[in-house]
Image (cartoon, rainbow, N blue to C red):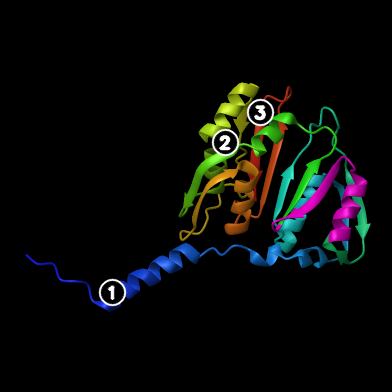
Amino acid sequence: MRLKPSPPIAFNAINLILVLLFTFVPEASAFNDPDLLNIKIRATAIKGESIGQVLGLLTEEYGIRVGIELGDEKLTPRREINLDLPETNLKDFLNSVIAKDPRYTWKLEGGVIHLWPIRGRDTVLTTLLDTKISHFAILGEVNRYAIYCDIMDLPEIRSKLVVAGVEPLTFRGFGSDAKLAKETFFDESNLTLRELLDKIVLKTEIKQWVISRWGKNGEYISLKGG
């Protein structure tokens, strides 16, 4: 039997579907603009919050992409941040927060606000964030908890955890069971864990990642986001 070629209209329809699939979740290109630091932040009153919680508010209220590496709180105990700020811009807001907790510094890199400790930095966390990942993909309606679990179970990450004598700890808390859109397509190769986490917050509905040491004796590494 001789196969008949598909009509052009069918071919075009298939290509249209593929284009829609691969471009459904556009990269947040607006957040790559240095003018992001000039975005207006409303008058804000903060009382008794940690620095991670404060940056979480930026994500919740303004959709700003954030990557947080928390310090070792056994070396530098958690500080409560109290602020009463008039309307300002993002750059001055972040500087005001850092002034209240000078253990940390921040930088806008590739559309993501990175926060990391300049004192009490955990060497295992920095090693993990610099670890090269060969491949990671997300396709369809997967919940956020599963994404974090899969990342911590990557062979490159798992081997570093074994060497360091720590275990992964992924919190199943508020929002972690929320599923991404069924059209989500994410496929990245040959990048560090930090770059992978940044790509996820730029290309999916997840807007923040947080990595920290956890446990009485620092026996766990926690990865979460929102």
Q: Position of residue 44 (x, y in %)?
A: 87, 60
The residue where tag 2 is placed is 152
Q: Residues within 10 Å of mark 1 (few under 14, many from 20)?
A: few
Foreground residue, 127 or 138?
127
Q: Position of residue 19 (x, y in %)?
A: 43, 68
Foreground: disc 1 or disc 2: 1
- Residue at figure coordinates x 6%, y 65% from the top left: 1
Measured Cα–Cα span from mark 2 to mark 3: 11 Å
* 209 to the left or right of 15: right
| Boundaries of the magenta span | 91-111
Amino acid on which the number 3 mark rests in the picture: Tyr
Give the mark nearer the N terminus: 1 vs 3: 1
Query: Is residue 67 shown above or below 45?
Result: above
Query: Is residue 167 shown above or below 17?
Result: above
Q: Position of residue 146 (x, y in %)?
A: 52, 43
Query: Is residue 222 shown above or below 164?
Result: below
Residue 220 numbered mark, or none: 3
The residue where tag 1 is placed is 10
The quadrant holding residue 205 is: bottom right
Q: Secondary structure at mark 1?
A: helix
The quadrant holding residue 126 is: top right
